[in-house]
Image (cartoon, rainbow, N blue to C red):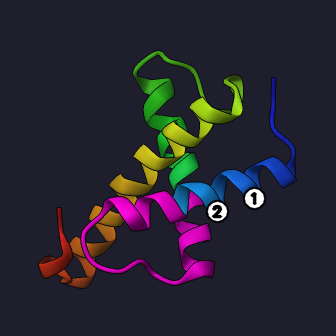
Amino acid sequence: MGHGIIAWIIIGVIAGWLTGKLMKGSGFGFLMDMIVGLVGALIGGWISSALGFGSTGQHGMIVSIIIAVIGAVVLTVILRLITGNRSANL
């Protein structure tokens, strides 16, 4: 079961918004939160596949969002480490 482009946009928006709410500090803005969510879905799918749970597209919408949020949190931590924004880390 794969997701279409509209579903990926919805997953990215929700994952980016949730990540902005979960992490301390402010988000990156609506567009960047969406991009972080979409890239987070790729990272989360890779992590999920590596751990044997399957990729993001093999699950329903809710599980895909959870996987995308996990990937987006990982991406946000990496971005904050690279940019030096340590005051907003977990």
Q: Is residue 13 left or right of residue 53?
A: right
Q: Position of residue 39 (x, y in %)?
A: 56, 58
Examine the rendered structure and indicate whether residue 52 appears above or below residue 45. Answer: above
For the magenta stretch, what is the residue range? 17-37
Examine the rendered structure and indicate whether residue 14 appears above or below residue 54. Answer: below
> Which residue: 41% across, 77% down?
27
Residue occupying the far front of the picture: 21
Q: The C terminus is located in which quarter?
A: bottom left
> Which residue: 48% across, 41% down?
44
Kind of residue sitting beneath label 1: Ile
Q: Position of residue 24 (x, y in %)?
A: 24, 69
Q: What is the CA distance from the residue labelled 1 to the residue labelled 2?
A: 6 Å
Residues at circles 1 and 2 in contact by the CB criterion of under 8 Å: yes
Kind of residue sitting beneath label 2: Val
Question: Which label number is shown at residue 13?
Answer: 2
Q: Secondary structure at mark 1?
A: helix
Disc 1 residue crowd, few under 14, some 14–19, many 20+, Cα 10 Å:
some
Question: Which label number is shown at residue 9?
Answer: 1
Displayed quadrant of residue 45 = top right
Question: Which label number is shown at residue 82?
Answer: none
